[in-house]
Amino acid sequence: MTATLLPQTSCVIVDQVGRLLNKPWCVYEHQLHDPATGAFTVIMVGSCPLAEVYQMVDPQRNSEWLKQVTPLSYLYIKITQTGERMDCQRDAIRHMRTFKPMPICNLKGIDHYGKSRVIVAPDGREFTTQQECALAFGLNQGQLSKHLNNGSTHVRGMVFKYKDMTA
């Protein structure tokens, strides 16, 4: 009997406290089951660390994925490749483009990391983005962001607040 050794790039190495030392990445497909036809449809293709594929961090930030997948949905996750981070990210894009039409979540979904917070200006006007607010007042968006995150008490003498923190 002979043993087949895996190439070093496909091995997962764990240290004494259980942390992955070389974090392998993967390319995955999310396939949604259609109960009417019994067929599976690929709704999203992406890449992430292999250890996080079933936590679905990226898909849960995608607006279209949140519309498509309900708690009662039957979702099939298929890992199509593993490897280094950059290779998997590049290959996920290539794989996504092989579908005609492209998976709906890749095509229409918007990444909404965290919730959008309305900004209230000193004059009472409301803005949906920091960029929009900064442009209206001729400010640097980075300075406004720092101010809103309690890094400074004002921006050019003006005080801005998030609407959910003004009460």
Image (spheres, rainbow, N blue to C red):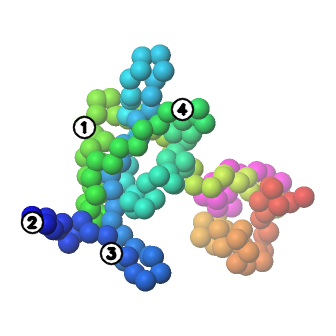
Q: Residue 129 colored magenta?
A: yes
Mark 1 and mark 2 residues within 8 Å of each other at the beta carbon: no
| Mark 1: few/some/many CA within 10 Å (<14, 14-19, 20+) | few
Q: On the image, numbered disc 3 is attached to which residue?
A: 13
Mark in the foreground, 1 or 2: 2
Work out whether mark 3 precedes mark 2 in sequence or the reverse, and give the earlier one. Answer: 2
Of 140 and 146, the residue lying toward us:
146
Which residue type does callout 4 highlight? Ser
The range drawn in magenta is 124-137
Which residue type does callout 1 highlight? Thr
Q: Can I make out residue 3 in this image?
A: yes
Mark in the foreground, 3 or 2: 2
Which residue type does callout 3 highlight? Ile
Which residue type does callout 2 highlight? Thr
Residue displayed at 43% across by 83% down: 16
Residue displayed at 66% across by 73% down: 146
Q: Residue 109 colored magenta?
A: no
How far separated are the C-alphas under marks 4 and 1?
25 Å
Q: On the image, numbered disc 2 is attached to which residue?
A: 2
Question: Disc 4 on helix, strand or loop?
Answer: loop
Mark 3 and mark 2 residues within 8 Å of each other at the beta carbon: no
How far separated are the C-alphas under marks 4 and 3?
34 Å
Q: On the image, numbered disc 1 is attached to which residue?
A: 98
Mark in the foreground, 4 or 2: 2
Q: In the displayed image of the protein, which residue is found farthest to the top? A: 36
User: Considering the image in quadrants, where does the C terminus appear?
Assistant: bottom right
